[in-house]
Image (cartoon, rainbow, N blue to C red):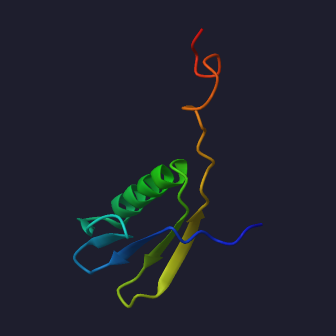
Amino acid sequence: MSAPPDDVTIRVINEGAGWRLECRPRFEAQMFRSGRAAEAAARSIAARFALSGLGVQMAVEDQGHAILGTTTFFPLPVPDTLNAAPAARGGL
């Protein structure tokens, strides 16, 4: 198994009144009312980064910044459709 990716880091942090989603180095922080919504958004963002060839480390933290859980999204190979033969692109 290869080493965990370090292209993108996503943190879901309990702030008491809500949950903050931080994504570095890509986005500004976002706030959510529920941890479930914040974690679902984080997983969706991480999956999109993985599909674009970037690795992601995601962590869920409590108010004291103790890590409650982590998930690694390994980068998926990006198909080179621009240089593929026309038949491979669905052409003639």
Task: Indicate the position of residue 41 as horizontal and vertical percent values.
Answer: 37, 56
Q: In the rendered image, which quarter contains the N terminus?
A: bottom right
Please report the residue visible at 30 percent of the width from the left and 64 percent of the height from the top: 27
Q: Residue furthest right?
A: 1
In this rendering, position of residue 24 left or right of residue 19: right
Q: Residue furthest top?
A: 92
Depth order, front residue of 92/64:
92
Task: Indicate the position of residue 54 as horizontal and vertical percent values.
Answer: 53, 58
Please report the residue visible at 35 percent of the width from the left and 63 percent of the height from the top: 38
Q: In the rendered image, which quarter contains the C terminus?
A: top right
Please report the residue visible at 24 percent of the width from the left and 67 percent of the height from the top: 31
Q: Quadrant of residue 70?
A: bottom right
* 78 relative to 69, above or below: above
* 13 relative to 42, above or below: below
In this rendering, position of residue 37 left or right of residue 82: left
* 80 relative to 72, above or below: above
Please report the residue visible at 62 percent of the width from the left and 28 percent of the height from the top: 84
Depth order, front residue of 17/72:
72
Q: Quadrant of residue 79?
A: top right
Q: Quadrant of residue 85?
A: top right
Task: Indicate the position of residue 15 as horizontal and vertical percent values.
Answer: 28, 80
Task: Indicate the position of residue 37 as horizontal and vertical percent values.
Answer: 34, 58
Instruction: Please count the marks in the image.
Output: 0
